[in-house]
Image: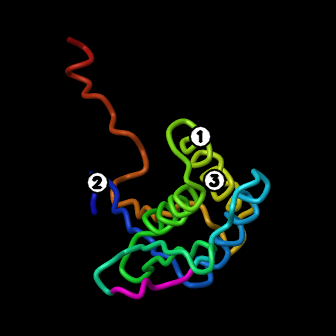
């Protein structure tokens, strides 16, 4: 993906990041009185990016990590909590927002396990803004 003056590289999610995200989301969900699903990877069906099933009444959310952007994986995890709790409409939206905040807040101390959506931007343009044309300014 490119943008004038910068190249954006999407950073995928490692299994360690996945585990840390699961713990953060579980903590945030429990604080809100929600059922916390078991998170697993990958789904048993190779054609799916995510699946949810119930084993003995407990929800299991399986998510494919390989070859997917971090944001897509985190989104699937959050949606798994929403579906596991049968949330709809405004309640689902409130929970999604709270869970995103829980994940984004984890990355603010700058540690290696940051869970904020990460992108690396490599500058390819000069750092100073372009100067206005003197002839155009005089006119």
Q: What residue is pinned by disc 2?
A: 3
Q: Earlier in the sequence, mark 1 or mark 2?
A: 2
Residue placed furthest toward the front:
56
- Callout 1: SS: helix
How busy is the neighbourhood of tag 3: few (under 14 within 10 Å), some, or many (20 plus)?
many
The magenta stretch spans residue 80 = no
Q: How many marks?
A: 3
- Callout 2: SS: strand
Residue at 35% x, 86% y is 45
Report the span colored magenta.
40-45
Is residue 24 left or right of 51 when viewed as pictured?
right
Q: What residue is pinned by disc 3?
A: 99
Q: Nearer the viewer, residue 60 or 50?
A: 60
Between the residue at mark 3 and the residue at mark 2, the CA separation in whole angstroms equals 30 Å
Which mark is in front, 3 or 2? 3
The image shows residue 2 at horizontal and vertical percentages of 27, 60
Q: Quadrant of the C terminus?
A: top left
The image shows residue 30 at horizontal and vertical percentages of 76, 59
The magenta stretch spans residue 43 = yes
Q: Quadrant of the N terminus?
A: bottom left
Residue at 50% x, 84% y is 41
Q: What residue is pinned by disc 1?
A: 91
Q: Nearer the viewer, residue 47 or 98?
A: 47
């Amino acid at each position: 993906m490119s943008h004038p003056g910068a190249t954006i590289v999407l950073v995928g999610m490692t299994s360690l990041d996945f585990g840390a995200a699961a713990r953060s989301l579980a903590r945030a969900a429990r604080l809100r009185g929600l059922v916390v699903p078991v998170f697993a990877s990958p789904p048993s069906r190779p054609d799916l990016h995510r699946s949810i099933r119930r084993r003995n009444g407990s929800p299991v959310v399986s998510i494919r990590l390989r070859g997917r952007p971090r944001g897509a994986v985190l989104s699937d995890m959050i949606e798994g909590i929403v579906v596991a709790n049968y949330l709809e409409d405004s309640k689902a939206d409130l929970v999604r927002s709270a869970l995103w905040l829980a994940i984004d807040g984890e990355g603010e101390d700058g540690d290696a396990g940051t869970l904020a959506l990460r992108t690396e931007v490599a500058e390819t343009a000069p750092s100073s803004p372009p100067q206005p044309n003197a002839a155009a300014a005089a006119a």
